[in-house]
Amino acid sequence: MLLLDKVYNAAYALRGVARKTDLIAAPNLVEGMDLHLKTENLQVTGSFKIRGAYYKINRLSKDELSRGIIACSAGNHAQGVALAATRLGVKSVVCMPDGAPIMKVENTRRLGAEVRLVKGTYDDAHDEAVRLQEETGATFIHPYDDEDVIAGQGTIGLEILDQLDGVDAVVVPVGGGGLISGVALAIKSLRPQCKVYGVQAEGASAFADAFRQDKWAASDSAVTFADGIQVKVPGTLNFEMVEKYVDDIVTVSDDEIAAAILALMERQKLVAEGAGATPVAACMFGHLPVEGKRVVCVISGGNIDVNILSRVINRGLAMSGRKVTLSLKLTDKPGQLEQVSHIIAELGANVVSVDYDLTDPDLPISSCILRVGMETRDNKQIEEIRQHLQDAGFSLAN
């Protein structure tokens, strides 16, 4: 049984290896709460995973180390294993899904691991890693379903309580459950009145579903751009600990995650990956009962591929009402565009694109679809523009 003593032991072992990341106030991020961010996105390797990976590998026997290290990961655990193994002079092989962000793959190689890309999701990479472990006899380092790994992640909980008094709730991303298991153990052992909440992506909700059903179960699919929590199979040890220590697990949509990433960039100057932004998304969109509370969101990682980031920014802009394209059904005659543009300009929006479509077979030959792309302040302004266009006699197609 995992006890708090092991978490303290992990904290001692990680001195000089993992950073004690800053806990920063975020008063302008979400209204109605005293919000703070535990910035594990600024951790060594850009993720909390170095904590559990290093502590686990550091505790292996000489015989276990001599056989080499093998692991599976969507990217962050891979980097933690690679760095820990290299620092300890051990060969490491990491199986990663072929859709893992290029940055995470290359960073894992740069840190000294041999990377083997596996077609499919994290769970397919896990199966291949298990097969290779049986074939080679290497020591397998599980990313979450392991007491030592959980203890390493639990050091985040110790740091939170040391850095901030009077914490009412801690919100944690959930994939396989290693992070929330460790954090919840530490928090509930030292401050039992503090709530611990988990957050998953809607498209990869295996742990949330199992938690609601009060029964461990795997999922058939895991679809989300938040690759760090794109997991079909919850950890069995993790599930036992979550049932004991965690108050609730909620889900957020990919669009809400994108909006949270954008908000963190704009208002806090922090880059978070999809998994790392899920706690903020849950607070921003009212999925948790934390209004008026002192809340800590664990920003678990910041390793987001720049190509994904550009798409995420656009989705976040759309989700927060900062970017919109309206389609209008028009009679094709002079002056229509001028009138539409005038209404939009009067209401303070900025037109960035205009497109005429004369080919819609459902429209009269003399009509067209006008698509106007705009930069806007928020969803309220978008609704004002819609209403003024309708009042002026224009028919909106969306």
Image: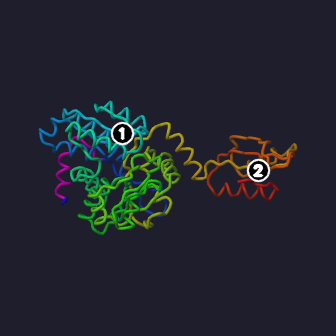
Q: Residue at x 50, y 55 (%)?
A: 253
Q: Is residue 10 one of those drawn in magenta?
A: yes
Q: Position of residue 302 (x, y in %)?
A: 40, 43
| Three-letter amino acid code at the position of disc 1 | Met
Residue, far left: 62
Q: Secondary structure at mark 2?
A: strand
Q: Is residue 14 visible?
A: no
Q: Is residue 279 left or right of residue 364?
A: left
Residue in the image at 21% along x and 38% along y: 138
- How many other residues sit within 10 Å of disc 2, few (<14), some (14-19) or many (≥20)? many
13 on left or right of 199: left
Q: Is residue 169 visible?
A: yes
Q: Nearer the viewer, residue 27 or 237?
A: 237
Q: Is residue 226 magenta?
A: no
The magenta stretch is: 4-20
Residue to which mark 1 is pinned: 96
Q: Quadrant of residue 73?
A: top left
Cα gap from disc 2 to disc 1, whole angstroms: 46 Å
> Which residue position is annotated with label 2?
328
- Tell me if mark 1 has few (under 14), some (14-19) or many (20+) residues whose alpha carbon lies within 10 angstroms of its own: many
Please identify, in this view, whether the residue under mark 2 or under mark 1 is nearer the observer.
1
In the picture, the disc for residue 325 is none
Residue type marked 2:
Leu
Q: Mark 1 falls on what kind of element?
A: strand
Kindly indicate whether the residue at mark 1 contacts the one at mark 2 (C-beta within 8 angstroms): no
Where is residue 278? Give x, y as percent: 43, 54
Q: Quadrant of the C terminus?
A: bottom right
- 305 and 134: which is toward the camera: 134
The quarter holding residue 62 reads top left
Position of the N terminus by quadrant: bottom left
Residue sitting at x 44%, y 51%: 222
